[in-house]
């Protein structure tokens, strides 16, 4: 059985990754604060505590496992939390986790010829043009994106066999209200008025498409930079209105707002006006066709 070590399994994307592990893998949960619950996983799972910020810790833990492949998802991901840490620069926990943490993993992988799958984001781009392909020039507009960009560069220049998988705002059902799907459903069920941004386009990623892309790269040894998101964009307002209509919730509760009204002037500037990835190259390479929200909603439950 191949050993697959995953960082960040307790996070949003990890919820689905753990549910979709192929049968021929032993999963090693490289957890930070809390291990992934065994009762939510049917296969074989081993837990190892790790702090990727520590090079010694990372090297010691990975050496004790000797994984066949590493899926590196651990990061500090909230745009505003990351931005607040920018004043500390390379001494800040966000840089240390997202950049140095990745460097520590890559350092082990380079010495031991272990391939890496790395999860990244549309935030490596500035969001000024309507869509970005896999080869477009990066130019992050927020600190989160800057650290993810640096981590990508470390991986790409390391000589390690690497797949970089970029997604946009992952969502799925049964999410404990951790994704925009569950958050909006909860507000609509409480019959609360909802304000949703209508001057931003995005291509939100159905998390099961992301996990499928990741497992395909692992199983078929596909390397490169890939995008996982639907081919058409919409606004967050359109997303939640579609959701309300699909599940017979009250669409009239949803009101339009703008990035500036919703986030305030400073935080709005950190958001990408076009948080959109194009993906025809990736779809062909990975053999996937990521779902549009309307198609994802058709197979999701509330
Ligand atoms: N969710 C999205 O919409 C989305 C979209 C595109 C790309 N991505 C990328 O996908 C990855 C996963 O995102 P997510 O939303 O699932 O993240 P998340 O929910 O914020 O979870 C982050 C994970 O990182 C772990 N972690 C943080 N610091 C660590 C450290 N020092 N050592 C080891 N583990 C540490 C956390 O564990 P603890 O909680 O125990 O600290 C947690 O499991 C990220 O790399 C993100 O950039 C996410």
Image: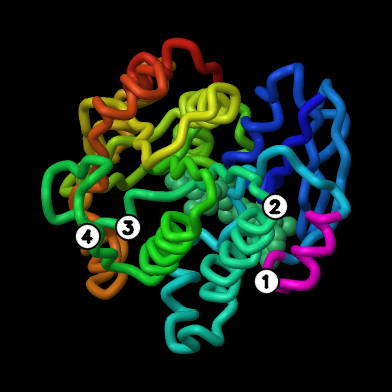
Q: Earlier in the sequence, mark 3 or mark 2?
A: 2
Residue labelled with disc 3:
124
Which mark, residue 228? none
Please state, as top left, top right, bottom left or bottom right, where the N terminus lies in the image.
top right
Determine whether, in the image, residue 183 is placed left or right of residue 31: left
Residue labelled with disc 1:
53
Look at the image and give the residue range highlighted in magenta.
52-63
C-alpha separation, residue under disc 1 versus residue under disc 4: 27 Å
Q: Alpha-carbon neighbours of circle 4 within 10 Å: few (<14), some, or many (≥20)?
A: many
Pair 1/2: label in front: 2
Determine whether, in the image, residue 105 is placed left or right of residue 273: right
Q: Earlier in the sequence, mark 1 or mark 3?
A: 1
Residue labelled with disc 2:
112
Residue labelled with disc 4:
126
Quadrant for residue 41, please give it. Answer: top right
Residue drawn at (23%, 68%) of the image: 269
């Amino acid at each position: 059985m191949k050993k697959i070590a995953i960082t960040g399994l307790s996070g949003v994307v990890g919820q689905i990754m753990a549910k979709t592990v192929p049968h021929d893998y032993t999963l090693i949960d490289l957890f930070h604060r809390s291990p992934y619950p065994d009762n939510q996983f049917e296969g074989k799972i081993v837990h190892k505590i790790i702090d990727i910020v520590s090079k010694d810790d990372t090297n010691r833990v990975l050496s004790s496992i000797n994984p066949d492949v590493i899926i590196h998802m651990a990061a500090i991901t909230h745009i505003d939390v990351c931005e607040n840490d920018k004043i500390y620069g390379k001494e800040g926990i966000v840089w240390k986790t997202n950049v140095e943490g990745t460097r520590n993993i890559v350092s082990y992988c380079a010495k031991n010829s272990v391939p890496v799958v790395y999860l990244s984001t549309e935030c490596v781009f500035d969001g000024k043009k309507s869509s970005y392909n896999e080869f477009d020039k990066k130019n992050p507009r927020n600190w989160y994106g800057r650290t993810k960009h640096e981590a990508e560069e470390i991986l790409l220049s390391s000589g390690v066999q690497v797949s970089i998988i970029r997604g946009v705002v992952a969502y799925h059902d049964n999410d404990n209200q951790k994704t925009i799907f569950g958050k909006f459903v909860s507000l609509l069920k409480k019959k609360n008025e909802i304000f949703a941004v209508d001057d931003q386009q995005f291509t939100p990623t159905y998390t099961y498409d992301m996990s499928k892309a990741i497992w395909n790269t692992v199983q078929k040894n596909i390397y490169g930079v890939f995008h996982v998101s639907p081919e058409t964009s919409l606004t967050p307002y359109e997303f939640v209105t579609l959701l309300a209509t699909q599940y017979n919730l009250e669409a009239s509760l949803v009101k339009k707002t703008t990035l500036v009204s919703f986030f305030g002037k400073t935080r709005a500037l950190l958001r990408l006006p076009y948080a959109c990835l194009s993906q025809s190259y990736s779809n062909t390479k990975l053999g996937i066709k990521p779902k549009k929200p309307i198609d994802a909603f058709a197979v999701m439950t509330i």
